[in-house]
Image (cartoon, rainbow, N blue to C red):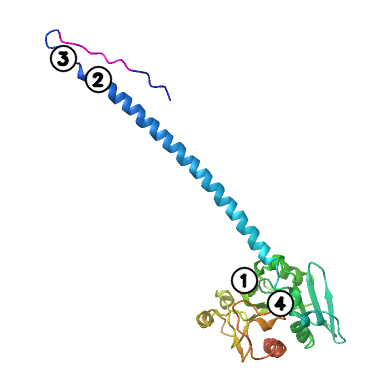
């Protein structure tokens, strides 16, 4: 901006009437006013730009803090109980192999052509499903539980695909989701062609992906489930394939599908976790046998 120079107002005097030259005065005042307005606009734009930069930096810092807090929260898994540790040991009829940083495999005595993959719910460690896996392995199935990055189900796709690719001897795959992993399981089952069926434990099918390809599904829930939204559950039934199966565990809740402390928002069950898991294993077994017919 050019500096505003002091204007000399020329005053012309009429020799007779000594009148001022008002036209010159007006033009000089307008010139001064226009320069001031332009200067004000420039300063206003400069201030807005400065405020925008500050706000952007604040939002960026808050976003980084929220991401750090979120992932720190995910890395604090839900506490497991003693049963999960006990069933992590190999028994006469079930062999347990833990691949650190990868997955846990529960194998029956005889080689199985059917593989089950349990995708853990949010903040739930894969070891928490050890007892249920033992029950399923005793029925002749090879059961895999991947270690999900950050204990967040959405990051499990690579793990599921990797398990299937590394086990070409298994020709039938069943994908199982618990609670918050239901959405991830739905998408993976629809996109991975090798998956032959899906099981939802305390979860529901939010999309119609399975219905579009008519992939068999089983839904299991407990009557005391405090996490499952039963209103949505009924609405989302329309998203399930026509060949879907449903099973209600009387007295069961959402927590008891794994051996963990009671999940936030869940109700206390009126049956034991062992009873609920045994009923679950029996129904999954029935579901798989129906697929072979």
Tell me the quadrant of the picture where the N terminus can be found. Answer: top left
> In the shown orientation, is residue 109 left or right of residue 245?
right
Q: Which residue is mark 4?
A: 118
Residue 19 badge: 3
Q: Secondary structure at mark 1?
A: helix
Residue 20 percent coordinates (x, y)? 19, 16
What residue is shown at x 52% (from left), y 47% (from top)? 55
Whether 281 is among the magenta residues is: no
Q: Which residue is mark 1?
A: 187
Give 174 or 130, whichever is nearer the viewer: 130
SS class, disc 3: loop
Looking at marks 1 and 2 on the same chain, the residue that comes earlier in the sequence is marked by 2
Which mark is nearer the camera, 3 or 4?
A: 3
Cα–Cα gap, marks 2 and 3: 13 Å
Q: Is residue 115 visible?
A: no
Q: Earlier in the sequence, mark 3 or mark 4?
A: 3
* Rendering coords of residue 86 (x, y %): 81, 82
> Residue visible at 42% across and 37% down?
44
Q: Is residue 12 magenta?
A: yes
Which numbered marker is on residue 25?
2
């Amino acid at each position: 901006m050019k500096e505003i120079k002091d204007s000399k107002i020329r005053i012309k005097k009429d020799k007779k009437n000594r009148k001022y030259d008002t036209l010159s005065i007006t033009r000089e005042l307008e010139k001064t006013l226009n320069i001031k307005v332009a200067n004000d606009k420039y300063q206003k734009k400069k201030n807005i730009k400065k405020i925008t930069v500050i706000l952007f930096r604040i939002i960026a810092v808050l976003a980084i803090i929220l991401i750090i807090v979120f992932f720190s929260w995910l890395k604090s898994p839900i506490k497991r109980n003693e049963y999960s540790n006990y069933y992590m040991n190999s028994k006469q009829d079930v062999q347990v192999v833990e691949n650190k940083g990868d997955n846990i495999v529960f194998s029956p005595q005889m080689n199985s052509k059917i593989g089950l993959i349990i995708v853990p719910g949010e903040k739930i460690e894969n070891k928490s499903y050890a007892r249920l896996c033992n029950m399923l392995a005793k029925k002749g199935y090879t059961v895999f539980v991947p270690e999900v990055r950050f204990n967040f189900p959405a990051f499990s796709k690579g793990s599921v695909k990797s398990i299937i690719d590394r086990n070409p001897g298994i020709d039938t795959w069943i994908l199982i989701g618990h609670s918050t992993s239901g959405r991830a399981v739905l998408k993976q089952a629809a996109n991975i062609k090798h998956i032959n069926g899906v099981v939802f434990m305390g979860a529901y099918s939010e999309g119609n992906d399975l219905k579009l390809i008519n992939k068999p599904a089983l839904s299991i829930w407990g009557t005391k489930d405090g996490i499952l939204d039963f209103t949505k559950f009924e609405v989302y039934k329309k998203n399930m394939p026509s060949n879907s199966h449903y099973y209600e565990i009387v007295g069961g809740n959402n927590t008891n599908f794994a051996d963990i402390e009671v999940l936030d928002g869940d109700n206390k069950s009126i049956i034991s976790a062992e009873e609920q898991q045994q009923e679950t294993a029996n129904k999954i077994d029935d579901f798989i046998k129906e697929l072979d017919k």
